[in-house]
Image (cartoon, rainbow, N blue to C red):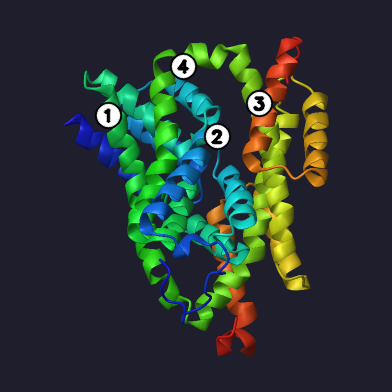
Amino acid sequence: MAGGEDAGKARQPGDAPGEASLGRRLLALTLTFGKFGGITFGGGYAIIALLEDDLVRRKGWLTQDELLNIITVGESTPGPIAVNTATFVGYRLAGVLGGVVATLALVFPAWLVIVLVSSCYLAFRDNTWVAAALAGIRVAAIVLIARAFLRMGRGVPRNAANLAAGTLAFVAVALLDLNALWIVVGGLLFGVAWYGVRPRLREGAE
Amino acid sequence: MIYWTLFWTFAKVGLFTIGGGYAMIPLIQQELVDRHGWVSLEQFTDFVGIAESTPGPFAINIATFAGIHAAQTEGADPILGSVCSTGGVVLPSVAIILLIAGAFHYAMRHWAVRAALEGAKPVVVGLIGAAAFTLLSHTLMPGGGAGFQWLAAALAAALFLLTQWVRLGAVALILLGAALGLGLRCFGIAL
């Protein structure tokens, strides 16, 4: 969806697929999210790290601000974060059809793998080679997520309030094991309270 | 009708869990084990383990797994059963996100929406850091009699330093991790 430039912030131009034909955009979404669905595992954060690396850094389809907004919406709405993020990104790049295509592309490899291993999942689980590869991937995924954390942290304006909010969120989830939903809702309220009194955001020029 | 029941059960799971795939575990367990009796508690524990260690989003994996086994238990087609359960878990998300995404540009005109999203930014970054921390601590200190995993710690540090010096894409990094795990296994070393 390339429209609505007058409202809020427009996407960066560059090689964003907004100018490409719908078919090309859908193909690109299929390949990108199909790849992500096939290689990530665990929670949604590995997907977020992949999106940051691929769509923000390499392809320039999204800005980091847009990705953070999409994650915020994904965290505070029902459903798996990976699916929410895929639908939203797909919609931003190619409308409703894009949202559906990106989601199907994400889901299909995961579905296929489970269909294939389900009949022999005990053998799959007890296979030491599979376990060795997965242990290696797990270490790589940690590095990937840590890198995304550092990169995205650099993109957030540096001030005492942001530092305090980020640290508080980290402690609440990592050490106190609170549900991420409440933390995100807390962040949204914090934003209204903190920036609400500042004329800059009120005027509209972000 | 088992297909409809599967679809509806997982649509509820998709609709009522907020905050990531792992938040779904208690609800899925309640539905599958206690309510419908499709799987035993032992099988369910196995599902969670497999869903964690297969590629793809956790919620999709566990929904697919549960759909296959529930359909088998009821003597129905497992593939169609998994399509219904996975479709069910995804559909509420897609519908809700499409509605929000469609209204997003208009909502962003309001200062309070922009302010709220601006405030959520550092919080979301903190959450990503927490995800890395939790995954790291579970990997290095798995518990259950196993001590500190020095090898995994060294490997994580080495990979991290490598990404600081060499421009390494996400897919390359994941594949490198898998290759290292397999390579160590060749020498009989378990990560």
Is the residue A96 above or below the residue A142 in the image? Answer: below
Is the residue A204 above or below the residue B51 in the image? Answer: below
Q: CA distance from mark 3 to mark 4?
A: 20 Å
Is the residue B9 above or below the residue B120 in the image? Answer: above
**Residue B38: x, y in percent?**
31, 24
Residue linked to disc 4: A121
Q: State if disc 1 and disc 2 touch (CB < 8 Å).
A: no
Indicate the chain on which mark 3 is placed: B
Residue A39 badge = 2
Q: Amino acid at mark 3?
A: Ala
Q: CA distance from mark 3 to mark 1?
A: 32 Å
Residue linked to disc 3: B178
Residue linked to disc 1: B81
Q: State if disc 4 and disc 1 touch (CB < 8 Å).
A: no
Is the residue B133 above or below the residue A118 in the image? Answer: below
Q: CA distance from mark 1 to mark 4?
A: 18 Å
Find numbered disc 4 in the image and state the secondary structure of the residue it sits on.
helix
Quadrant that contains the C terminus of chain A: bottom right
Q: CA distance from mark 2 to mark 4?
A: 18 Å
Quadrant that contains the N terminus of chain A: bottom left
Count residues near mark 3 (Cα–Cα under 10 Å), then give few for <14, some for 14-19, many for 20+: many
